[in-house]
Amino acid sequence: MDYYAQGSLVAAVVALAIAVYLRAFARGDAEARAFSDLSLLIFLWCFPEYLWKTLPSVFWHKVSLAGVMFIPPFALRYCGTAVRTRPRWLPAAFVAGVWVSAGFAATIFHDPILNSPWWNIAALLFVYPYLGAGLHVIVRHGFRNSPSAVERKKYQFLVVGGGIASLVAPLNFLPGTGVDFPPLAAFAVLVFFYFMATGILHLHFFELPDIVGRGVVLVIQIFAFAVVFGVLEVVSGRKFWFPLAGVFLISFFLLTFYPFLMRKLGGISADLLVRQSRRVQSVLSDFARKLPESSSLPAIARTVGEALAQVPFVERASLWVRPEGGTDEGIGTLPVRPDEYLRAFSRFSKRYPALRIMEHGGSKAADVAIWDDSFDASIPLFLRGTLVAVVLFHWRGKRPSFREMDLLIPFLDGIPLAVENIRQQQRIQRREHFATVGELAAGLAHEVRTPAGVIKGAAQFLSREARAKDREFLDIIVEEADRLNGVVTEFLEYARPTQRKPQTISLKEPVEKAMALLLRERGERMETVGRHVVVQEPAPRVDADPAEIERVVYNLLTNAVEAMPAGGDLTVRVTSGGGEARIAIGDTGAGIPEEDRPQIFRPFFTTRERGVGMGLAICRRIVEENGGSVSVETSPGRGSRFTVKLPEA
């Protein structure tokens, strides 16, 4: 029996063993089923080829050719199941290929057609395009669809091993065209199956333990061949029919011990990945139970830190929560400004749309070099399209695979909702606080205004007959009494319960009225200020008190103008999206100092010499009573932008 017959038999038995094993142990895996079907066709090709070489009958050669003609469409079908997104044209191409294969198989048993060189040429023109289409699917829909590191290795094996097998196997048709070429197909297929079979069920087998394990299996195979041949030679006392006996015995060895070896080799990877994955899931499940119990942002940060500290591949982690409209100061530190981070993540998402965790530094995957080496990766967390928090990671040792990283995402996605729940509770507590303070404010205002009015009246009376030097001090008393009365008025406005009259309004109206009022009251100052008002069409509509929204816009416009004493650009944008209406008011002033940012929404905080410091506090209260929020983004020397968000009607 020649070497080609031996190779065909080995390839046939191995293919049958793989087909039976995958059908028995991977019934719910579409990729495994497709590879099992392909393996069965390989058997139906190689085993009749072996029979043709050992039995004097051309019938088996025809059966072999019939089997091989069905391989291209089934190879294409397997490639479609091996990638995440199957191309739309693939099912139709598969069905068409099966019909063409059936047509070729029907003509095989007609000797004049089979013996024609044109039949072999036509077969080559059918086989190569389909095999090439399968490789095209792997390259276009596998490599270009952001595969994990493990999946990328699988695709590399498919392209290299499958490419070699696809190139060599159809060359068996060349002798039929008159070209003398040795039949190497069975050997190419055998090599391809050797490298692919163990990875179909468990992708992590392509990691280092699997490569070592396959080397061990190869050594065992060689040793088994030597032992079997040696024992047969000793027992027989003569040169025995070692090739045929060895092939059958080694094939039986593979068929019998294949599942056992797979489980043993899988145990190596299980220690590194499967058990680790279970540990990660256990840790994060406990985290998911504790997260809703957190009553403050620091408590959430502690819960996140404690949970991620137990994840095997995380050295340390940090939670940054974006400050929310004066509700709180946020928590943690982001290495860059939020707008820069969002731009970086936007670039990353466009390049790798399937990934959620962004790598930092000079990573080719992220293409972002704006971070230092303090963290290796991060995951942004959004709520209704708005960035709420970012979890930053520093890996322990080497970077984990994307498959391991993906274990974190479902649990961390609950953080934005937990943050929103805490902030909603804080808003409710503030409203209750305002109601209590409002009851006290009326009495307190009376007790303060009455003596202040008496002091002012007395000072005005005395100033009529006072000397010029004394009149200057009396004027200061009157001015400060007026200022005290203004502070009391602002405090009453802030503290007393409002009589809201909500109605469905277009945000265009309060913006236009507030801008007109600003132009009337700040006429000369507005000559040095460029105005840019952009309102989305149709204008967003909200359920709110129009007078209150107008006051909020006017206060923010006034602050923006006062932030630009030498002039600048005032920008107002009214937009909507994600169920929210937004009014963004920006200036090109000096910006807000870092140390002042946590204080700007607090009552009586002001940076102006004669300011009361209630404007932004009142804005925040009004917006929150209408179910919204107000936030600020600022950059020293470049200006600030205040954004009011309200539920869209």
Image (cartoon, grey):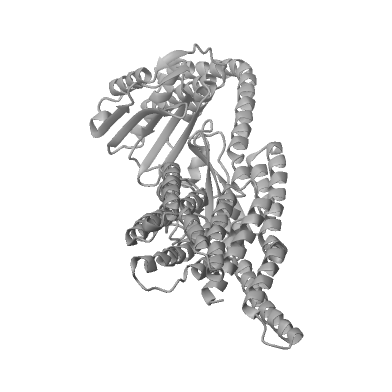
Q: Is residue 231 left or right of residue 74?
A: right
Judge whether 239 appears above or below 254 on screen.
Answer: below
Q: Residue 570's quadrant in the figure?
A: top left
Q: Residue at x 62, y 70 (%)?
A: 214
Q: Is residue 73 left or right of residue 254?
A: left
Front-most of 160 and 170?
Answer: 170
Residue 414 locus on image (x, y percent): 61, 39
Residue 151 locus on image (x, y percent): 53, 57
Front-most of 622 and 178?
Answer: 178
Q: Residue 270's quadrant in the figure?
A: bottom right
Q: Is residue 582 left or right of residue 84?
A: left
Given the current orientation, which residue lies at the most extreme bottom position? Answer: 237
Residue 636 locus on image (x, y percent): 39, 47
Front-most of 421 and 76?
Answer: 76
Quarter in which the N terminus is drawn:
bottom right
Residue 517 locus on image (x, y percent): 32, 20
Q: Residue at x 65, y 70 (%)?
A: 213
Q: In this rendering, does residue 487 appear at all?
A: yes
Front-most of 560 and 360?
Answer: 360
Judge whether 286 appears above or below 209 on screen.
Answer: above
Q: Is residue 507 left or right of residue 46?
A: left
Given the current orientation, which residue lies at the most extreme right position? Answer: 235
Given the current orientation, which residue lies at the most extreme left position? Answer: 527
Q: Residue at x 62, y 32 (%)?
A: 421
Q: Count how many numbered circles sit on residues in the image.
A: 0
Q: In this rendering, does residue 375 appear at all?
A: no
